[in-house]
Amino acid sequence: MSERPESPAFKLGGILTVAAAALGVGVILWSKQSGLKDETHRRKGEVEAGPQVRVLRVGAQSADRSLNLQGEALPFASTTLYAKVSGFLRNISVDKGSPVRAGQVVAVVESPETDRDAQALQADAENKRRNAERSRALGKDGLLSPRDVEQADADAKVAAEKLASQATLKGYQVVKAPFSGVVTQRFADPGALVQNGGTTSSAQPLMTLAQVDRLRVTFYLDASVASLVKPGTLVEVRPAERPELVRSVKVSRVAGALDPRTRTLLAEADLDNRDGAFLAGGFVQVSLKVKASSRFAVPTEAVVLRDGKSVAAVLQADGRVRFQVLQLGEEEDQRLRVLGGLQPGDTVVLNPPFGLKDGDRVQAKGA
């Protein structure tokens, strides 16, 4: 069987088909290569431009600050009463919760020894007084020397002074309230043996008296705001168990120095409690506003710890960052007060990426 020769047109078509296929493959390869180059250039540009970060411009905050502190509502005056003489408790006329008035007799101590000493001194003083009178009469008649007369007068005066001192001591058998208030504790009952509270540390107290119609609201101020609170500063006081009850009072006094242990400053406000709305000895919430100088604050997410120091990444005009060491104050509402290290208008990076270094470029986005 003989082969039929191919026509020239058929051969030309095959060649064109192969050429077209080769050209298509070349175009595809060239496109991919070009795309890879573009991607490489794009990624290189991104690397050179740096990572995308959120930034925030630093500005001054309002000078007004609100403080919410815990305090105590203490009796305006409180004291524990002791017997001034030793003896038996004859009577105690008050108990826990009893209201008392200033000068009211609250207890009587029976002291036989004190009574006997007073009687003896009374007799001695009377005897020496009469002796001095006789000596003066004899001296006028020249029957007694002036020196003896003077000695008799001196003895009479000494005896009178001793009697007066004993009378004062005898008066201590009656115990009186030093101020108006309420008895908060009672430690002794009638018949109990009591000791002189001024001569022995083991003496048993009689009762504790507190003034509760007027309270001292005490609270402590941090050193950063201590200088901003003065007598006359308005505060709001709420009982911890009744936050809906609010009393507005003014700071009455401020301690002149920080507590060396806590570095805080004690402040007190006097509270009228004649209606008994506040319980003496209870916790209270104290709220106040202070006028501070203009200050800067940054979000906590702008501060990182490096080499043991608090720093912030500050964005420069050329798009690079510079890590700046900060001096920080207290934290409030997720913001840190900046005492030094930043200036108004500085732009800081929020949550700086790990590995970001001084001089690195970044792409800034608003926070």
Image (cartoon, rainbow, N blue to C red):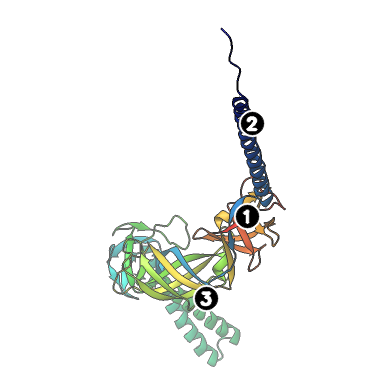
Does residue 15 appear anywhere in the picture?
yes
Q: Amino acid at mark 2?
A: Ala
Mark 2–mark 1 contact, CB under 8 Å?
Answer: no
Residue 109 percent location from the top left of the image: 34, 65
Q: In terms of depth relative to the viewer, which is nearer, 50 or 175?
A: 50
What SS does tag 1 mark? strand
Residue under pointer 3: 230
Label 2 vs label 1, nearer the camera: 2
For image coordinates 47% across by 86% down, the residue present is 133
Residue 274 percent location from the top left of the image: 31, 74
Crowd tier of the residue under label 3, counting other residues whose Cα lies within 10 Å: few below 14, some 14–19, many 20 or above: some
Residue under pointer 1: 363
Residue 4 percent location from the top left of the image: 58, 15
Crowd tier of the residue under label 1, counting other residues whose Cα lies within 10 Å: few below 14, some 14–19, many 20 or above: some
For image coordinates 33% across by 67% down, the residue present is 278
Residue 19 is tagged as 2
Q: CA distance from mark 2 to mark 1?
A: 48 Å
